[in-house]
Amino acid sequence: VKPTTPRCTVPKAVPVGKSASLHCHENEGFPKSTYSWYRNSEPLSPDTKAKPHNSSYTLNPSTGTLVFHAVHKGDSGHYSCIATNDAGFAKCEEQEMEV
């Protein structure tokens, strides 16, 4: 079963140095969806080795949670999430997070 459009929760504004949690979830898809996050249409890698050094976040593809440990100005942008399974994918509306 193809995933439905996921619900994305993105904080509107986060003070520099604070943590921020972004959530993405849908529960219609079968098999269970995996989630990927995008900032300004660029994919955010769940692999810590592939990340830019100035960014500190944790991305869990199975829960759809993206956590920034200490945000900085460079983390501002438009975030969206894609839920994917064997039957297809669905994307949530892009939302802006300001730091």
Image (cartoon, rainbow, N blue to C red):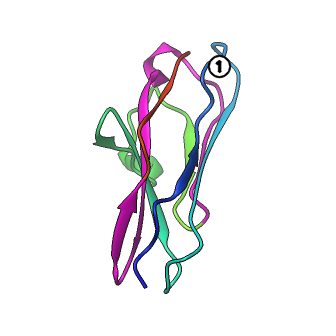
Question: Residue 78 versus residue 2: which sits nearer the camera?
Answer: 2
Q: Under tag 1, what secondary structure?
A: loop
* Three-letter amino acid code of the residue under disc 1: Val
Q: Which residue is mark 1?
A: 14
- Residue at 29% across / 40% down in the picture? 42
- Residue at 41% across / 38% down in the picture? 94
The picture places residue 84, in percent across and down from the top left corner, at 39, 70
Quadrant for residue 87, please give it: bottom left
Is 89 placed left or right of 81 in the picture? left
The picture places residue 88, in percent across and down from the top left corner, at 32, 75
Q: Badge 1 local density, few (<14 within 10 Å), some, or many (20+)?
A: some
Q: Where does the magenta region start and end?
A: 63-91
Q: Quadrant of the C terminus?
A: top right
- Residue at 59% across / 72% down in the picture? 27
* Magenta-drawn stretch contains 77: yes
The picture places residue 83, in percent across and down from the top left corner, at 44, 64
Residue lying furthest left in this view?
41
- Residue at 55% across / 77% down in the picture? 28
Is 16 placed left or right of 31 in the picture? right
Question: Residue 45 versus residue 8: which sits nearer the camera?
Answer: 8
In this rendering, the answer to whether 72 lies above or below 80 is above
Image mark count? 1
Q: Quadrant of the N terminus?
A: bottom left
Quadrant for residue 63, please give it: bottom right
In this rendering, the answer to whether 1 lies above or below 88 is below
The picture places residue 76, in percent across and down from the top left corner, at 47, 21
